[in-house]
Amino acid sequence: MSDNEPLLSVRDMEKHFPVTKGLFKKQVGAVKAVDGISFDVFKGETLGLVGESGCGKSTTGRLVTRLLEPTGGKVVFEGEDITHMSQGRLRPLRRDMQMIFQDPYSSLNPRHTVGAIVGAPFRIQGIKTEQGTKKAVQEILELVGLSPEHYNRYPHEFSGGQRQRIGIARTLALKPKLIIADEPVSALDVSIQAQVVNLLEDLQNELDLTYVVIAHDLSVVRHISDRVAVMYLGKIVEVADRKSLYSVPMHPYTNALLSAVPVPDPKARKERERIRLTGDVPSPLNPPPACRFHTRCWKAQEICRKVEPPLAELATGHQVACHFPENAPDQTPAPAATAG
Amino acid sequence: MNFLDVKDLKIHFPTDDGLVRSVDGLSFGLERGKTLGIVGESGSGKSVTSLGILGLHKGGRARLSGEIWLDGEELIGASSEHVRRLRGKKMAMIFQDPLSSMHPFYTVGHQIIEAYRIHNDVSKQVARKHAIDMLGRVGIPEPARRVDSYPHEFSGGMRQRAMIAMALSCDPELLIADEPTTALDVTVQAQILDLMRDLQREFNSALIIITHDLGVVAELSDDILVMYGGKCVEYGTTEDIFYRPEHPYTWGLLGSMPRLDREPTERLLPIKGSPPSLINVPPGCAFHPRCPYAERTKGKADTEVPALAETEGGHLVRCHLDRAERQSLWENEIKPVLETQ
Ligand SMILES: Nc1ncnc2c1ncn2[C@@H]1O[C@H](COP(=O)(O)OP(=O)(O)OP(=O)(O)O)[C@@H](O)[C@H]1O
Ligand SMILES: Nc1ncnc2c1ncn2[C@@H]1O[C@H](COP(=O)(O)OP(=O)(O)OP(=O)(O)O)[C@@H](O)[C@H]1O
Ligand code: SF4
Ligand code: SF4
Ligand SMILES: [Mg+2]
Ligand SMILES: [Mg+2]
């Protein structure tokens, strides 16, 4: 981590998907998939992005890599505003920002050899001769723990973990600066998950990579991240360095999430104090007003239903959006909150 | 005799590529009121085992052998018709994906009512009241209204609850839950695990929970069976498996998993390689290509299948290493690394 300029900076970013009805596709509402989020990613660090299904993690990843265009706010990469940059101008930037996807199988073309898949970025960008491409691809294959002989094989000949390595190899081809990994290990077996997590860490050290790792598994995120952002229904509710987030979580939702993770220790089932949330995550089509968590929060008060709590820094580097945070030095509501 | 006894169960599938030995000599027992956790990686034979117990391979191309005793009755030799009648009444299953096991065109209530009436000679009104009662018991809000909803109108967590209601509606004595919470969010998973624990206590049923998540088994199980390549490699109480594991594969699973209840480790300790093909299962100990201790077994690792041998108090381990060596490896090499890192 460093404290200089962020590599990626996101401010008030929004993505509202229109919901249409009828023959004339009249807009009747919007899915507020991402609804005003701000965060920074610094060079060399790993930012973990966690939250439950549908909270907007993947959308966030697609917005910052500009696979989707934001409907509001701004995305700045290396000091340059890329929010509405044209595809043509984005092209060179695509080398610097890459995505790794969850499903190692569906993201690889079954009819292409490993050589073709991993070498595609070189060919598309036309930056290497055929001979040069083969050599470069074989080097990358070795880097991710595959063998250079795998060059002419097809994806179906590989196991899930190996396919994820092929996906990672493809991502690395153009020496990106930022990698957004969307659930990179959740489709893999535990033993293979650990291999891929270690590989991502090794590559980060060797190649000086910056990661945003999106995952719903809180244990994996703690293992791999330097800082962690927690999302709920299109909002970031808490951001902190991993130690603070996991040892003194302040947002009630973060507390509930951590307390819900089953612990692989039979003694813990008797001793642990649990927070049990009732109900499911509400729909992002009609999110609850003000604090979106108030329908499930055991601390909710009148103000939570009326005034949206801003994401405020309550301790160094620890931002929380809550009127009545847990583990906070001072329990009075943040002053900005009352201003609305 | 246990309520459920599985003896030397084999389930093989002939395919164009060869014989798939999905389950290859599995034995275990389970009493009423107890929970058995079955863990293992993808393709280790967990689901095939549970479908086998429920008699759902009958009439297919699977080759079954061995014995399955449920409450004193042998099921492998029994007619499909007979096993079908036991299903629902005596044993029921909860699947990972509720949508695939619920009919999309019928209301949730209709499906519970039908399932209930197959086994109980009651009027529709009585069955409907029972369905509403069951939906309420599993925590569906406003059950009298939601009984007429279609499965797609429920959220993932509610569908899983509805399926549990359906599975429990005939008060089965054996309940098999195959990855019941894998598709759910962690806060909803916690609700469902609590629910299953409470209902099991109330109904005193025997519960088998199948999962790849060691956290989930630790929460619910009395005993744990670790599967690898279609075989049981370790079996013991939950305490045996978490505090005194003796099989190198179990150690590998524990080392692979980042844990929230410990200080973060610098590095995870993965198992090298990947799970075996069940058509060409490695000879000898199926785990030997991935096992860091294979060298220590005096050439037996790849020639001789180790027996599942009892160590102490029902704790079974399938490994050629002698017990003293396993215990010393665990105490001196594995446990310190898992705990202190
Ligand atoms: N193209 C789209 N059109 C309309 N709605 C969409 C679209 N893409 C995503 N959404 C909605 O936006 C919300 C956020 O989706 P997103 O995929 O970002 O969630 P996620 O946090 O990645 O969830 P998961 O953990 O399930 O992957 C969801 O309600 C989803 O249904
Ligand atoms: N009908 C079938 N025909 C042929 N092979 C089968 C059949 N059903 C299952 N298998 C094979 O049997 C093996 C065990 O499958 P099973 O579904 O029991 O795995 P599992 O342990 O439940 O894995 P997962 O964790 O992925 O659910 C797999 O290799 C699978 O491909
Ligand atoms: S603002 Fe209120 S409802 Fe929202 S998390 Fe904080 S206490 Fe709960
Ligand atoms: S028998 Fe040998 S290869 Fe198999 S688990 Fe034991 S030590 Fe490892
Ligand atoms: Mg996603
Ligand atoms: Mg399965």
Image (tube, rainbow, N blue to C red):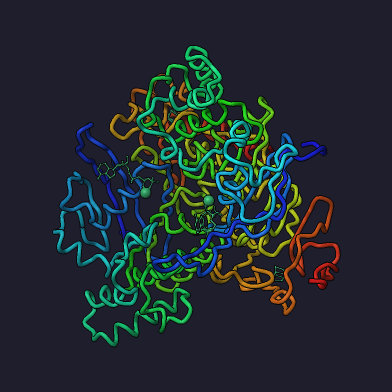
Tell me where residue B243 appears, x and y as whole percent.
Answer: 56, 46
Tell me where residue A14 appears, x and y as whole percent.
Answer: 64, 56
Q: Decide which of A300, B166 is in the foreground and name it.
A: A300
Q: Decide which of B167, B65 is in the foreground and name it.
A: B167
Tell me where residue A96 appears, x and y as whole percent.
Answer: 63, 32
Identity of the residue drawn at 35% across and 63% down: B175
Most distant residue in the top direction: A131
Q: Is residue B98 above or below residue B121?
A: above
Residue B237 visible from this viewpoint:
yes
Tell me where residue B307 appears, x and y as whole percent.
Answer: 35, 35
**Residue B330 figure quarter:** top right
Image quarter (top left, top right, bottom left or bottom right) of the C terminus of chain A: bottom right
Q: Decide which of B162, A230 is in the foreground and name it.
A: A230
Left or right of A111 on screen, residue A11: right
**Residue A230 figure quarter:** bottom right
Image quarter (top left, top right, bottom left or bottom right) of the N terminus of chain A: top right
Most distant residue in the front direction: A24
Identity of the residue drawn at 45% across and 32% down: A163
Q: Decide which of B239, A239 is in the foreground and name it.
A: A239
Residue B200 visible from this viewpoint:
no
Left or right of B250 on screen, residue A257: right
